[in-house]
Each structure stands twice: as structure tokens, then as C-alpha cells.
Amino acid sequence: MITSKRSGLSAGKLRQKFLDFFENRRHKVVPSSSLLPPSGDTSVLFTTAGMQQFSLYLSGEKDVLEDFGTRHLISCQKCFRSDDIEEVGDDTHNTFFEMLGNWSIGQDKDGNYFKEGAIKYALEFFVDELGLDKNRFYITIFRGNKNISKDEESEKIWLENGIPKERIKEFGEEDNLWGPVGEIGVCGPNSEIHYDRGEEFGCGRKDCGPNCSKCQRFVELWNLVFMQYHRKIKNQKSKIKTSQEPLYEYVALPQKNVDTGIGFERLLAVLQGKSSAYETDLFWPVIQEIEKISSKKYNEEKKIFRILADHLRAAAFLISEGVLPSNLTQGYVLRRILRRSIRYAKVLNLPKDWYVSLVKKISEIYGEVYSQVRTKETDIITVIQKEEEKFAKTLEKGLKEFKVQSSKFKVQNQNLKSKIIPGEIVFDLYQSYGFPLEMTKELAEEENLKINESGFLKEFKKHQEISRAGAKKKFKGGLADVREETIKLHTAAHLLLESLRRVLGNHVYQKGSNINAERLRFDFSHPDKLTDEEKQKVEDLVNEQIQKNLPVSFKEMALEDAKKIGAMGVFEAKYGKKVKVYTIGKGDNVFSREICGGPHVKNTSELGKFKIKKEQSSGAGVRRIKAVLDS
């Protein structure tokens, strides 16, 4: 595999070289944002691209000059994509990854650049700075559709910069119309630089090229997005796509933007002459550690080694940001990759506490760049340990049950070409043994079987309806009644939630409550028992707000507006189109905003003194506080 003149470049040096290159060209370095989207943003589960923290600037809703002093920005952004989990193990896919990006936002007289500038910078960095062979570049451009015309401008610029016509390929919306991150938002045509790794990685077809579905010869390294449009839903009443009327319309943005992204791991692999990132210094110490504790060789169990290394790295980053395993949203994704790792650790027959040394290696690799992975190392190990303990109890039984059911199913259906395991069996493995749907699917594929996903979902829905029926017997909002003392404790619960988040971190969310006239019981997400100091800090913070005599008010608004102002809520719950948002405090002295049906007191001075009586576990990753109000 031919790489570049600088194939010895380490991960750390490559990151710095990129930042230095653009900083020397008047770009401002912006630190990576969280892997978790801002509070209230439910359009995505994770940060999936470098542009997400700049989306309001790219759309023109916020002034980039006011906040950054320049229109030229760069970052090395942490990203997580859960839709690629099944692809992990090949040469190019990871769940957690880093994205190098540069931006030119809007226009002024300050030498801002668009397509021509972005393409020239890309070639200068790849060819002049990194020494990549320009003759191995293949370029893709947008061929156009009935809404947006072909990107002839980019094609012309690539030709002028020495890329021959035969190495410029046209593709449609799926490959070369980028965005938006959610259903609506900023987007535009993109032009990608693909690198030809050589015939040894190819499928042998004469028409093989970028985006080939048969091989991984051509690796996409840099995506140059030219944001020119805002995608909107054309017909709000109907979301059914028809040939007569398209689902979306594309409105020209008042400003043009450049948004680029380099897959850091892919580029590093090419520069170091490796077949994948798993052989680079980002992963190799972890791979070697797996070899050591498994007494097996990487080349013998390559896919399993890669999945373990990828999933443990991704889990470490998620846990370091406060995500805990659960059956909802980000927590479900974390549980899924951890349980997948636990199963493969069993396949390799890894020793007890196998993850400890692997997490320590990940901490060594990333500690200097992302300090929270190092400072939260003990927390990461503890969360994985608890999830393994919880899952290990049922994993072996579940695997035996799957073997029994799959063997029986094969015998009963031996004459059928397509053997599909019923949804009832898949759901039983989920409910009784904690097997995520995807794990059962993976196990089935290993036995040349399929699963009935729609049947599983039907059983799952039936289970939810039974659960909801039981829940309806409880008083709305977790209140046992609406006596004065109960209402006071209900208001105190709002103060408690916000205080917990300020003391423990933004990973804290309400997981349930039960409030009567004597006490409040409040469940929340947190991995560890609270220390005496933490409990005292929470208690003091609640009482501080009570003593401030803060007003309590509410306003009805659209759910989306409530999320925009950062109102807390149990977002897996089903809200109506309009919600009540209760605010404790006023003006610059707002302490809490929460979506809630009420009722509440009118002023915190009515509450008396708040006292935590007990703090205990309420399940994996969930703690429970019992508290009272003394008059």
C-alpha cells in the first residue's frame, strides 16, 4: 500500500499539524464540544459531525463574529454514530471517531472563501503538507436533481487544480448532498476526496471506483460541504412522498458557508500505511493488550479484536460524559455496545475484569488530548463492571436458551429456504435475558437464521400497553394527592433535580418520583452512591433557593419552544403539543425550568427547611432520595 512521504506521523502529531496548518491561515481553534447534544435538542442522540456546534452560525441565526471574532474556524471534534455499529470490524467504520474540520461562515471583506478556497486548502494540506500522492485522488461531486442543479463549479475548480476528468465522479443525493443533521436544517452539495489504496484492496471490477459497494479500495478522506440551502418540509400536513410533490423544499441561505470534515482515523491509517485504524497508534496498544489477556493473535480473531477495541473506546468516552447504561436513548446505545463487548469477551474466554487493563490503555492513548477519559477512568471501569455483573447473570442462560430455540426451530423448519425466528422468541430473550434486539439478530445470522423484527416490535408494544395500563392507576405526576404539604414537596422536587445536576453533573435526569404529604421520593440517573459531602451540598443548595424567596410561575408553550429555552423534562414521556413550563426564579435569577403539569406553591419561601433523610440505589445506574420539609 503506497501512502505518503510522512508515513511515520503519529496521531498526536497529525492532530497538531492540522490545527497549526489552518491556524497559520487565520483560523481560530475551537475546542471539541460534548458528544451529547445541547439540553433540549432531541433531533439527534449524539454529536455526529463537527458542524453541529456551529449550526446556528451556519444558518445565520447567530453572529459568528460576535462570539468568535472571525468567520474562519477549525476544530478536532469528538463524534459518535450509532448507525454504523453493525459495520464495525471492517477497515473503515468506528462508533466513536474524531473529525477534523475547517469552516468559512458567511461573507464579508475579510477574505472569506467558498468552493475555490476550500478545494485549494484541501489540496495544499494533503499534498504539500502531508505528502499524499495527488495521482491517487478520486473526486466526487453532486450530479444534481430536480431541486438543485449539478455542481459544475466544483468540477471546474478540481479540473483547474490538476484532477483529470476521468477521476471526477458524479453521484446523487445519498452520497453528495450533505445534511441536514436532523429532518430540516442547513445543507448543500458536497465534494469528497477519495484515496485509492491500491488493487490489493479492490474487488477486481473494471468499473470499481469511489463508493464501490463491493470493496474498500477507495477510502473517503475529506468531505467538503458547500452549505447553500435550508431544507424545509414542503407539506406540513402530509409527509408522504409522491412523484407529484416532493417532501422537502430547498431555500437558498442568506449566506454561503464552507463546512469540511476529515475522518481522522481513516487519514491516519493511510498516512501510516496500515489497512485500518486498528493497526495505528490509536488502537494498537489496546489490540496488543487483548492479545496478552486472551493468549490469541489479532490475525486469528481480527473482527472480534476490532469490535472489542472500538466498543470499549466508545463506551469510555460516553461514560466519561455521564452516559449510563439504560433502556432509553443514549443509555440504550451504551448498553448495546457494552453487552456486545461482554459477549465477545466471553467468546475469547477473557479473564475476570478483562476490561480494566483495556480501559487503562485507552486512558493512556487519549488522556493528554481528552482529559476527562483519564480523570474519569475509575468511573468508566465501575460502570462497565456493574453492567457486566448485571448482564453476566443472564448471558449464559440466555445463550443456552437461544441454542435450544434455534436448534428446535431449525429441525421444525428444515424444509424452508428462509428460516425466520418468531418475534415472541426474540422478545422473550429481550425480556427474560436482557438481550438487545441487535444481539439476537447477530446470533441468528451466525446460525444462518433471520429474526422476525416486526413480530418482536408487536410483542414489545403489547408489553408497553400492559405497563402503561398499570401506570395509569397512579396519580398524574407522581403525586399521591393535592394537599398543601404534597404541593410543597412537589415544588421542592424541582429544586432538588436542579441542585443534583449542579452538584453531580448534567448526566442527572429524573427517572421517577412519588410524593405524598409526608415525604418526597425521587429517582435520578447517577452511577454512584452520594458522599456525605455531596448530599450536604445538594441540601444546602435547595435551602439556599428557599431562603431567596424565589417566585414560582408557569407559562404554556409549544413543546419545541420549551426545549429551546432549556426546560427539563422526561422526554421519553409523551407530551402534548402544548406544555406547561414551571420557572423558579425570575430574570437573571432563574434557578429551574421544568416541563410539568403542576400544581406548585407561588414562592419558595412557603416551603420551610429541606432535609434529605435517605439516599440509596434504585436499580442499575439509578439512585433514590427520600426527603422531607420541616416547617
Image (cartoon, rainbow, N blue to C red):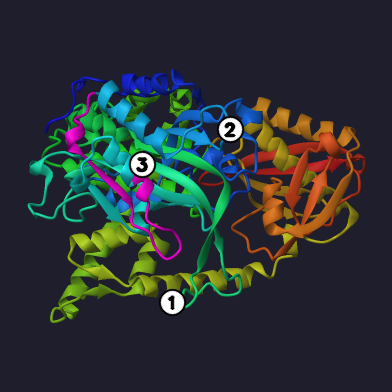
Q: Nearer the viewer, residue 509 or 90?
A: 90
Whether residue 460 is situated above or below residue 579 in the rendered picture: below
**Are there few (<14), some (14-19), or many (20+) residues within 10 Å of tag 3?**
many
User: Which is closer to the viewer, label 3 or label 2?
Assistant: 2
Q: Secondary structure at mark 1?
A: loop
Q: Earlier in the sequence, mark 3 or mark 2?
A: 2
User: Which is closer to the viewer, label 2 or label 1?
Assistant: 2
**Residue 223: assigned label:** 3
Q: Is residue 299 magenta?
A: no
Q: Secondary structure at mark 2?
A: loop
Note whether residue 302 is visible: yes
Q: Is residue 151 magenta?
A: yes
- Measuring 66% from the left and 29% from the top, which residue is drawn there? 66
Residue extent of the magenta highlight = 131-154
**Are there few (<14), some (14-19), or many (20+) residues within 10 Å of tag 2?**
few
**Residue 108: assigned label:** 2
Q: Which residue is mark 1?
A: 243
- Measuring 67% from the left and 70% from the top, which residue is drawn there? 472
Note whether residue 99 is visible: no
Q: Earlier in the sequence, mark 2 or mark 1?
A: 2
Question: What amino acid type should be assigned to the residue bearing mark 2?
Answer: Asp
**Residue 311: assigned label:** none
Q: Nearer the viewer, residue 542 or 53?
A: 53
